Image (cartoon, rainbow, N blue to C red):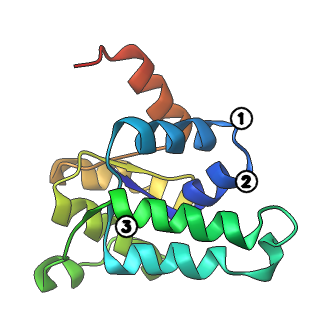
Amino acid sequence: MVIDTNVWISGLLSRGGYPGQLTRQVIRDGQPVFSVATFAELKERLWRPKFDRYVSMELRKAFLADLESIAFWIDVPPTIAARSFSRDADDDKFIHAALAAESAWLITGDQDLLVLAESVLPLGVRIISPADAIGLSTRSPRK
């Protein structure tokens, strides 16, 4: 599954909320999907000084190293990368990653992506919030 940067950061900052539950579950039981572009955004945002008072640099480095080692890495073909979906073009990289990986889910808290849920569903991608993802995973039997 593809997880948007805002969910990863929220999960790191607050372990008790839906983003924290979801990201821990994905790290424990699944395999997060990253493209070079989606991982670069996460890395760049986590280095911002505003997070210094919440999460140590050592913890951020370890978090990124752990994600990098367990991730399913995909290359986004030019035909997918050329497509536009969101009014915020910077968000398209997450849809591109989901399409390239043939991922069924894109988890985000970003309203610019959530409003696209119906339009990308025919492409095989469900865009849902962390709360909805947790709800679905608790209702689905484990295989």
Q: Residue at x 44, y 18 (%)?
A: 138
Q: Please give the count of numbered marks on the rendered protein.
A: 3
Q: Which residue is mark 3?
A: 94
In the picture, the disc for residue 68 is none
Residue 110, can we see it?
Answer: no
Quadrant of residue 67 in the image? bottom left
Asked which quadrant contains residue 86, the reply is bottom left
The picture places residue 127, in percent across and down from the top left corner, at: 38, 48
Q: Name the residue tied to disc 1.
A: 16
Q: CA distance from mark 1 to mark 3?
A: 25 Å
Give the left or right position of residue 75, taking residue 45 as reference. Answer: left
User: Which residue is pictured at 45% across the width and 34% down the height?
Assistant: 133
Which residue type carries mark 2?
Answer: Leu
Lateral position of residue 116 relative to residue 78, left or right: right
Q: Secondary structure at mark 1?
A: loop
Horizontal arrangement in the rendering, residue 141 relative to residue 12 (left or right): left
Mark 1 vs mark 3: which is more N-terminal? 1
